[in-house]
Amino acid sequence: MTTHAFWRSALVATCVLTLGTACAEEEAAPMYQAVAVVRRDIVVSASAAGQIEPVTTVEVKSKASGEIRQVNVETGDAVTAGQLLVKVDPRVPSNALRQAEVDLDVAKAQLTNAESQLRRSEELHKTQSITETEWEQAALSAANARAQLVRAERSFEDAKIAFEDTDVRAPLSGIIIEKAVEVGTVISSATSNVSGGAVLLRMANLDTVQVRSLVDETDIGKIQPGMPVTITVDAYPNRPFSGVVLKIEPQATVQQNVTMFPVLARIQNDGLLLKPGMNAEVEVHVGNQQNVIAIPNAALRTDRDVASAAMVLGLEPEVVQQQLAEARRVQAETQGGEARMAGAVRDSGAPAAATVSFGGRDVPLPEGVSAAQVTAIFAKMRDGGPQSLSAEDRAIMSRLRGSGGREGGFGGARQGGGGQRANNSLLGGNYVVFVMRDGQPSAVPIRTGLTDLDYSEVVSGLALGDTVLMLPSASLLASQAEFAQRMGRMTGGGLPGVQRR
């Protein structure tokens, strides 16, 4: 070996050994962070941008055709139902009305004449002064006169309606938001024209408005109708408006390859400050839990991550899985059992013998043990598991098991049919955390509630004073394992002067 080759091999060996020593020191460092379980407030909201729009918008059209003679409103005017808005040229409908009125008078006179002739014909028919045919003709003339009167009355009513239609009135109370015609504009009828007629005005009731916003599909599962919302607009940046979620549209829209769902929020528009078309920022208040037990989300592990996390902590994955299975069995019996007091108060006032649901069976309470004590023990079990029980609590549980309860069964106790039920929070899930118990890490299944993506509410499984371990993510562990394998291949061969230990 030449001198140059020797020093090159020595240099490579030194670098590899130095890198291996650094990795060993890094692996020796703790790969987790211990965090105490504390109480905190968790507030969750979903934000989106939208626009103010009226709840109801009405297009005002005219049933009459002709020239606009008068426009009584401008945009922004507040009008009441029935108020005169626009007047169309009434000359043609007025002439038709006068003609129909005269025709009605003629029809009434003709009916009067026909009825008089019919009465005379009846008298003459009784004395056989006229023939049967002449009497029938008089009756027919009277019937035709009555039919003509009905036609004249209908024509008069139609002409009257057509004349009244030249006055376009507000269909509801609201605000004029758009004016499409001016004096002198010739319009077509909305009822007789196949195109639907001309739109004269648009109006809306702005006492209550709504915001249509697009919410990302990742957040839509958090939102439900009836949730409170806060809306802010640029015109009033320091004045938030309150409302509620009205509904979530079932059909999604895709914008720039992002799937979103329209969400409608209803807002009471006091003072009519919110105008249609205003841009608004919508914040949906998904949940707000005050002073609850919470832990960082980085401490949560799914069942798939348990094995890798156990290896980081130096635990056997099989042993951890057995511990989790036993803990879940205990929790299932805890949730499934419900303690109760048997019977009601006797006439003398003495309570009936108390029983507790323990391990799926009704077990009488031992002498000297109250329902309140059992309830407190079960609460400890729900919050902190069997490790949270004191020596006295364990003695009481042993006495319960001696009264006929199965090992490991936990229910709850109540008296008189009362009791409290746990509150299931939104967005909860089942996870596993590693907790320091007696100086050793232990896997504990927990149930979480509301989460703000940084912290999660703990519904059951942990208690104040516990310490959870924040471990690296599964992807980080995989990359570290890949790096270790690569280093092992490098030191295992191919480099002169370096041996693998």
Image (cartoon, rainbow, N blue to C red):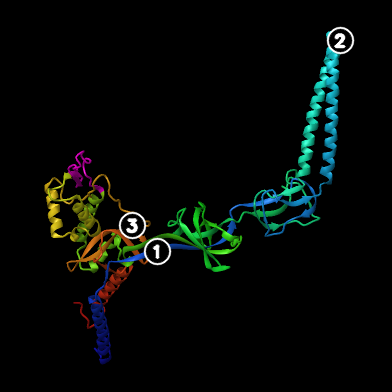
Q: Which residue bears the numbered disc 3?
A: 429
Quadrant in which residue 486 is drawn: bottom left
Residue 352 shown in magenta: yes
Q: Position of residue 222 (x, y in %)?
A: 43, 57
**Sequence-earlier tag: 2 or 1:** 1
Q: CA distance from mark 2 to mark 3?
A: 101 Å
Q: Quadrant of the C terminus?
A: bottom left
Residue drawn at x 37%, y 57% is 427
Residue 474 shown in magenta: no
Mark 2, Cα crowd under 10 Å, few <14 / some 14-19 / many 20+, is few
Left or right for 460, reference 359: right
Disc 3 + disc 1, Cβ < 8 Å: no
Q: How many marks?
A: 3
Q: Which residue bears the numbered disc 2?
A: 131
Disc 1 marks a residue whose amino acid type is Val
**Sequence-earlier tag: 2 or 3:** 2
Compared with 160, 231 (above or below) is: below
Along the line of sight, the residue nearer the viewer: 317 or 232: 232
Q: Secondary structure at mark 3?
A: strand
The reply to whether residue 95 is visible in this rendering is yes
Q: Position of residue 451 (x, y in %)?
A: 37, 62
Image mark for residue 43:
1
Mark 3, Cα crowd under 10 Å, few <14 / some 14-19 / many 20+, is some
Q: Position of residue 402 (x, y in %)?
A: 11, 48
Q: Position of residue 432 (x, y in %)?
A: 27, 61
